[in-house]
Image (cartoon, helix red, strand yellow):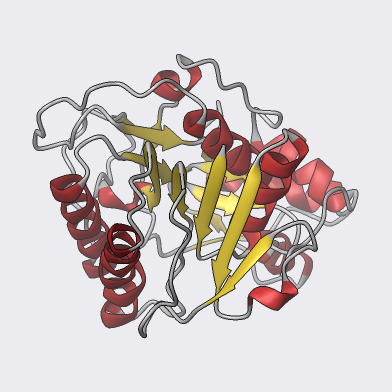
Amino acid sequence: MNLLIVGCGDLGTELGLRALAAGHRVHGLRRRAEVLPDAFLPISADLGADLPPLPPDIEVVVFTTAADSRDVDAYRRAYVTATGRVLDGLERAGSTPQRVLFTSSTAVYGVDDGSEVDEDTPTQPASATGEVLVEAEQALWARRPDAVSLRLAGVYGPGRTRLIDQVREGRARRPDRVIHTNRIHRDDAAAALLHLAGLPATPASPASSAGPATCYLGVDDEPAPLAEVVAFLAAELGLPPPPVGEVSRSRGGDKRCRNARLRGTGWVPAYPSYREGYRAVLAGEGTRHP
């Protein structure tokens, strides 16, 4: 497999390393591609500007881009404009990838009542940035109806320790009401992308209000109350439980995401819940990528 990873940061680098270990050829596109591991075929490019010529023989392209801020315009540049530019560049190169994968977010679901969410749940984002992600998916599916969107929940792992840091520094709070959270370890997210890249291509289903069948929720097996997660982290760190207080969840809402469709393809998470995943992070397992 000849793979192009667009926006090859932390998640993309982990995906690339796994692809290389499996014997695939990996091109990594990012602003400073010289920082990528030696086995990558680097492509230095600013996705906000004209792209250099892209390889003509790409078989799979994976978009792992990330906005550089929570600003709506930054999201549109990263997810809508950049995706279109790369697809244009591949067309100019005469490259027609067999598979196109796109990393999106469970923020496309504006659910805030603790109910279950799956791929058939209508996309009704509660934030402007979530609306941009829906726009990006729809624009991609208009050009590539067979494209696959992996809607990731909160990604954590080496270098992604925001919640751990909040608990350690005494800034975390246990919500005064039940708020469910959804997570996936970075390594499981990368493994899911590589797994989906290797699946046989299937015809795309007609789009619906929830999007076509070619989307998956990238979450672990266990949605969990935020109070439970921060209390667990405090115990692992040898600290008392954080105090109860008001916690804003304007970005994440309150929902319980299901991974049954992704699991049904044969993907199995190495970290089925936050407990295994955060213990690995606290033990220093894994590598933080550039």
Identify which residue is drawn at 56% across, 22% down: 267
Residue 184 image offset from top left, x and y in percent:
58, 42
The image quadrant that residue 21 belongs to is: top right
Quarter of the image that includes the C terminus: bottom right
For the point 87% across and 48% down, the residue is 285
Task: Name the residue at 40% across, 44% down.
Answer: 101
Q: Position of residue 15 (x, y in %)?
A: 63, 47
Q: Please give left or right for residue 176 compared with residue 81 in the image.
A: right
* Image point (59%, 62%), residue name: 28
The N terminus, quarter of image: top right
Percent of width and height locating residue 102: 38, 49
User: Is 81 or 73 nearer to us in this picture?
Assistant: 81
Nearest to the observer: residue 231 or residue 70: 70
Q: Position of residue 82 (x, y in %)?
A: 33, 70
| Residue in front for this viewpoint, 46 or 279 | 46
* Residue 152 seen in the current view: yes
In the image, taking residue 4 as reference, residue 210 lies left or right, namely: left
Q: Compared to 63, does 86 lie above or below?
A: below
Camera-nearest residue between 219 and 73:
73
